[in-house]
Image (tube, rainbow, N blue to C red):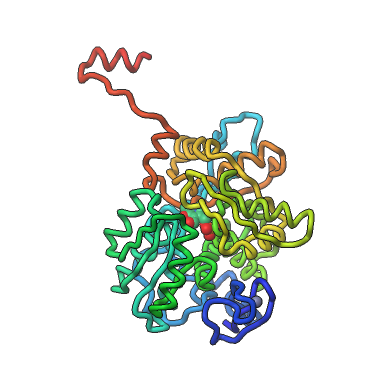
Amino acid sequence: MEGFKCIHCEKEWTKDVDYVCPSCQGNLDIVYDYSSWAKKYPRSYWKDNRDFSIWRYAPFLPVSDLTKAPRLQIGWTPLYKMENKMGSKKDNPAWGKLYLKDDGRNPSASFKDRASAVALVHAREQKASRVVGASTGNAGASMACLAASVGMPTTIFVPHTAPQAKIAQLLIFGAQVIMIEGTYDEAFDLCFQIAQEYGWYNRNTGYNPYTREGKKTCAFEICEQLDWKVPDWVFVSVGDGNIISGLWKGFQDLYQCKLIDRLPKLGSVQSTLSNAITQAVEHYLTHKKIEIRPVQARTSADSISVDMPRDGVAAVKAIVASQGQAVSVTDEEILDGMKEIAQKGGVFGEPAGVASFAGYKKLLTEGIVGKEETAVCVITGNGLKDVPSAIKAAGKPTVVPAELEKIKKYIGK
Ligand SMILES: Cc1ncc(COP(=O)(O)O)c(C=O)c1O
Ligand SMILES: [Zn+2]
């Protein structure tokens, strides 16, 4: 690690900077000296590496003391190639080229564990006494889970509307829960003030540059699991924009050190009811200027319900640089996607987790994703985190009397 570069004003800083750009308060990107990487870490290095977790990529991460890493299994989640029947359109062979990356298999059942893990090691390296964070639910649950495993106290701010399962996670992992009678955006700002006043380590998405670094490990895994063949597309759902910018950072790292020879197009997927980044990309394409304007988020995909994306500039830059697409899908399309990948792929994702698939399907239908192109949809959260949405998507079961004849009659129907 060499230092930081501001994503907004592009000024470079040494390692001593805390969190954001001292000049413009913009989010920071961590800068590395790539020159030694290609020689030191060729493909053969990875083949012989027996650590199947995010820590196999430790040389590419901005932390050094791995004795401070949680012992839980984080990352190296499965990448499943879907069968042709996916999508159920006989005339659409592209469905056979779809992969699902099941990140609901992480310790707290979401992608966020990648970020929390790196932030936690950094916090411990800094001798932090407590980690604080604001969350729509998953980032907090993740932080609480990993911190619990190493005895680090946490304080988590969440909106009172967060699904019960995520609140249960916070409580069972022993976090101090501050449930805000307000939105995620309000929780974020209040958390920021408390962190400053109490001198606690702040994990907030976008604001803390270490979260993006953890998230990039998913891109490393995708490439390695595909034997270094880069997919044409990578789809992911977007709220604050930190996951998508993290994925892009990961592909950049691999490209810079010649482990891959091309870059994928990024598919950014938002709900039509929370689409500040989709709008910002459209604005950029016509005006060549990045402007992130807040929306009034109302989607029931709670994890991506964000008024003001906290890593919006990095996300827009990533989508545009990859020559990708920013697409919005309706909440109904998200629930249809949830049912389809569960019933045809055996993967159960929460609404925000499967929005990636809904966006992929939309762009495939519109012909923007070619039928011969390979695509990875990252499933960022497990479906058991939001059971009411699953029931809404799949329907309620019929109660049948405990009598053989009546059961047969029901089966006959
Ligand atoms: C399951 C899930 N998917 C996607 C996202 C979106 O990530 P980001 O806010 O970094 O865009 C989140 C964020 O909370 C999430 O929990
Ligand atoms: Zn700056």
Q: Which quadrant would residue 230 be assigned to in this image?
A: bottom right
- Which residue is at 47% across, 68% downward? 204
List x then y, in percent, for residue 93.
64, 36
Decide: is 317 above or below 196: above
Residue 225, can we see it? no
Residue 377 image offset from top left, x and y in percent: 56, 49
Furthest residue in direction front, as rendered: 181
- Give whichever of 255, 352 is nearer the camera: 352
Name the spot of residue 102 as percent of width and height, x first: 47, 51
- Residue 126 percent coordinates (x, y): 42, 83
Quarter occupied by the N terminus: bottom right
Quarter of the picture holding the C terminus: top left
Residue 154 drawn above or below residue 401: below
Query: From this viewpoint, is residue 258 visible?
Result: yes
In this view, 385 is above or below 39: above
* Residue 363, quarter of the rendered image: top right
